[in-house]
Amino acid sequence: MVHVLHLLAAAVPTPVEQTAFDGNVTFGSMVRLAGSVNNTLSVYDGYTLSVIENPLTNKLEAIVGTDSGVVRTADGVTWSEVTGSVPSRRGEGGLDLATPPPFIHNFGNTQARYARKDGPITDFWGTDPIAFSIDSAGTLVDTVRTGVNVTFTGLPRPLGCSWVLNRCCTCPFRADSGNAVRLADGSLVMTMNVFLKPLITNFSGDGSSVVAYTSDAEGLAWTFSGYVAVAEDYQESGEGPNESTLSLLADGKTLMCVIRLDAGDGHVHAKPYHKSTSVDGGKTWTPLVSLPTDVGTAKPRMVLMHPTNGPLVLIGGRPGNRMWINPDGMGDEWQYIPLPHGPNVTYGGTGYNGVVALTATTGIASYDEGGSLWGVAFSLSSQA
């Protein structure tokens, strides 16, 4: 059974003023996806947003998981609750990309099997990942791939929890901290934050690091690829490099990873997002460079709207929920885009948001605000 969620307002586009972005961003009406007394879904961070192709329309749809169910939309105007679905549980990760169905939406029980273990751990694995597909009738189907393993191997330095100060984050790794992208040869690259055993004594901070893994097209067998940012190199961060988002740039070959350094959990002042790039498929990465001071600070999510023209759309927050656009898709210059607010909202959310592209000029953003989870469509257009 499918329920259409209550629309809070007519879907009348609302222009947003821009100062330097060479184009216009238009948002549709916000739709309350969770947290309302009018539906059964519970409040959930908005970053569990993915896309999947509908074989009936040959178009992408957005799906977002709450902690009690899944909702879907083809246009950001009409959303439907998929009853009986297995929720995309927090902490189990997600590939966040459209692949031939069924695609693996999370990493099964990988996170739960190792939670708070002291280590040392270099290889880890889980079972029973969840796969989503849309069947010939247009129904969103979720399947637990019982008995199927998801493996992560080859990490040179051991993981563990005994050296973590327990001020932030889930150790010894966090499977939902990054996302994956598909390269031209069909392989996958993903980033993840991990807690490596420190190489120096008297290390301060929580010691999180970000590493890259690669996999074949199916996304079940992952092999360590390279260190993106390790804690010892960024001791000014109380948390250490942790939550991240990954995208190919508009040149079709460069990977860019945007990373959270501090957002208040490491007992130091918040810092803007930092970025690192790779031109060899995730094996080697450049030192972190800060994005502008107004960009950040909590869990980032990013999407390249068009594979060769851009723009890049980045969403994040804390305080509040925010969007930025890099017009040329190469990740250097960023313009702030104000996101719409829900009615009668008096306080912000976690800053954990999601963004996906449905076409080269349209997409969906999701974010929690004022105790509710919201979805909103946006469109990009060039100035006349």
Image: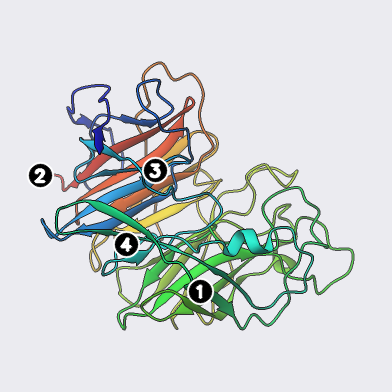
Q: Is residue 311 visible?
A: no
Tell me if residue 342 comes above or below residue 354 in the rendering. above
Left or right relative to 205: residue 37: left
Question: In terms of secondary structure, where does tag 1 sit?
Answer: strand
Q: In the image shown, does 52 or 12 lie closer to the viewer? A: 52
Q: Where is mark 3, residue-wise?
A: 323
**Among numbered discs 1 and 4, the one appearing first in the sequence:** 1
| Residue 384 image label | 2
Q: Check whether the beta carbons of the residues at disc 2 and disc 1 lie within 8 A of each other.
A: no
**Residue 136, label in figure:** none
Q: Secondary structure at mark 2?
A: loop
Count of residue discs? 4
Q: Nearer the viewer, residue 346 or 173?
A: 173
- Closer to the chain start, of discs 2 and 4, is 4
- The mark closer to the camera, 1 or 3, is 1
Q: Residue at x 49, y 65 (%)?
A: 128
In front: mark 2 or mark 3?
3
